[in-house]
């Protein structure tokens, strides 16, 4: 368990967002603290009308929560120390906001509190509603163990109570053991009593009835005596795993943002170099593939370092895929068509500069998708990614955004450069790392011509 938390904290410490990092580290510290304590956390959960707060009052034997109809429901989670005969250690009993009746914020808080529970007490006032059933299943899928309590049985005929209990056990049998379904009357209605006096007169009085929660208390004691330590450790592990997942999600977004910045920087560096450097015709793959430096940077961001030679090989393989699947021809068509009506044509930014940026972005996003997936390189999967990115990046709004950025990102001297001479390939590209590019061979010229 300690190793799991240490691993999670290492993940959290990589986050750049200070607020998120500190919040997650605080949660990790809380999990460690909870593990050191000899205590159990019970959370009472359910809709507002089920009588959760009345049940908490009955269990504690004292009035700790408002149950008036005008309140409607507990607005915030409230926790109390609770002692159960035969159970060693402290029991923390938490009442939660009711589901459905206080809006998304209150319901979200209730579900968050439920995630902290070693054991849930799920309270209903009749057969399960569809919404209650879905929440119960969701919590069970997240590893939460629950005791299902049918409350307000003082308002139900005994035979009807047994019928409802049987139905509840049947519906929840896959996630709740039958003996974990019990009935209670946490706040019984006063009993109407008629008194006949010796003088022949009659009076009617309403007598308060004591709560009936013994079946629930017995079941709580049985479960905590038998499985309490296991539930406590399992809950700490579950919370740690969920914390790790939250940190991983934030870290992944952070890495994606960093990778996007690298791709953006490299695409415009390539465009600027293509526009101002008079080179002879070069390998078309140089314009279609991200270079080894970009691949290496992306691997570093995702903590999957590779050598420069491996990065160059990956870039070349990516370029081959883009070329074979018509990426170069597509860039010529979509960029060339868009340039006809773009202000870029008026300031002299050549087609091959924008196309170089376009192809660099295509290949960069493909490789980013590959690294984000965490999967090994597979030819068929990579080809599918190439097809999807080429399809997405041909949309007019994407091209328009690219052209708009070119006006801001390309330097003035690039905008004023002379159009390329006929002897210069429209697909000249210079890698920002100044790598030497191979000449186009005869077979590639034939492939392009076809």
Image (tube, helix red, strand yellow):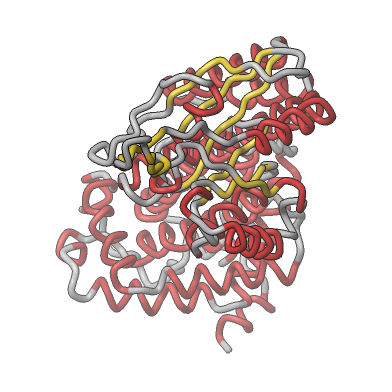
Image position of 211 (left or right of 393): right
**Residue shown at the point (61%, 29%) measured from the top left:** 42
Of residue 110 and residue 371, the one placed in the foreground of this image is 110
Residue 56, visible in the rendered structure: yes
Which residue in the rendered view is the most extreme toward the bottom? Answer: 450
In the picture as drawn, the residue positioned furthest to the front comes out as 199
Q: Is residue 168 above or below residue 13?
A: below
User: In which image quadrant can residue 331 be found?
Assistant: bottom left
Q: Residue at x 46, y 52 (%)?
A: 155
Is the C terminus in the top left, top right, bottom left or bottom right quadrant?
A: bottom right
For the N terminus, give its image quadrant.
top right
Horizontal relation, residue 400 to residue 240: left or right: left
> 175 and 274: which one is in front?
175
Q: Whole-percent x and y of residue 379?
A: 75, 68
Residue at image point 63% right, 82% down: 447
* Front residue of 26 and 384: 26
Where residue 312 appears, x then y in whole percent? 69, 49
Left or right, 405 with respect to 320, comes to left
The residue sitting at 64% across, 64% down in the picture is 163
Front position in the image: 104 or 27:
104
Decide if residue 300 is in sight here.
no
In the rendered image, the vertical position of residue 264 relative to residue 447, given as above or below: above
Residue 370 in the image: state x and y as whole percent: 64, 55
Q: Position of residue 390 (x, y in %)?
A: 49, 72
> Disc count in the image?
0
């Amino acid at each position: 368990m300690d190793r799991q938390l240490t691993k999670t904290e290492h993940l959290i410490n990589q986050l750049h967002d200070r607020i998120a990092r500190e919040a997650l580290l605080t949660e990790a510290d809380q999990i460690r603290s909870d593990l050191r304590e000899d205590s159990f956390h019970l959370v009472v959960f359910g809709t507002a009308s089920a009588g959760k707060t009345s049940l908490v009052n009955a269990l504690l034997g004292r009035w700790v929560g408002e149950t008036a109809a005008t309140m409607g429901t507990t607005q915030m989670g409230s926790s109390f120390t609770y002692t159960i005969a035969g159970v060693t250690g402290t029991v923390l009993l938490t009442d939660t906001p009711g589901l459905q009746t206080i809006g998304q914020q209150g319901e979200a808080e209730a579900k968050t509190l439920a995630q902290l529970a070693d054991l849930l007490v799920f309270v209903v006032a009749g057969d399960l509603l569809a919404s209650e059933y879905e929440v119960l299943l969701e919590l069970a899928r997240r590893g939460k163990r629950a005791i299902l309590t049918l409350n307000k049985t003082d308002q139900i005929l005994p035979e009807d109570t047994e019928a409802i209990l049987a139905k509840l056990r049947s519906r929840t049998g896959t996630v709740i053991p039958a003996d974990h379904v019990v009935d209670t009357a946490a706040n019984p209605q006063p009993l109407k009593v008629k008194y006949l006096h010796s003088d022949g007169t009659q009076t009617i009085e309403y007598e308060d009835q004591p709560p009936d929660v013994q079946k629930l208390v017995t079941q709580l004691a049985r479960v905590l005596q038998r499985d309490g330590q296991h539930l406590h450790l399992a809950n700490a592990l579950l919370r740690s795993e969920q914390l790790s997942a939250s940190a991983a999600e934030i870290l992944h977004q952070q890495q994606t943002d960093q990778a996007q910045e690298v791709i953006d920087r490299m695409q415009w560096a390539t465009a600027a170099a293509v526009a101002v450097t008079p080179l002879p015709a070069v390998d078309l793959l140089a314009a279609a593939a991200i270079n080894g430096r970009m691949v290496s940077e992306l691997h570093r961001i995702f903590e999957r370092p590779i050598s420069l030679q491996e990065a160059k090989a990956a870039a070349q393989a990516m370029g081959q895929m883009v070329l074979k699947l018509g990426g170069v021809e597509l860039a010529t068509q979509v960029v060339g068509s868009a340039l006809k009506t773009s202000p870029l044509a008026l300031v002299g930014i050549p087609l091959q500069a924008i196309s170089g940026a376009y192809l660099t972005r295509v290949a960069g996003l493909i490789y980013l998708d590959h690294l984000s997936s965490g999967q090994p390189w597979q030819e068929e999967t990579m080809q599918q990614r190439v097809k999807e990115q080429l399809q997405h990046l041909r949309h007019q709004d994407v091209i328009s955004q690219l052209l708009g950025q070119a006006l801001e990102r390309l330097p003035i001297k690039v905008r004023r450069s002379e159009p390329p001479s006929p002897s210069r390939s429209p697909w000249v590209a210079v890698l920002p790392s100044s790598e030497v590019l191979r000449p186009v061979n005869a077979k590639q010229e034939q492939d392009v011509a076809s």
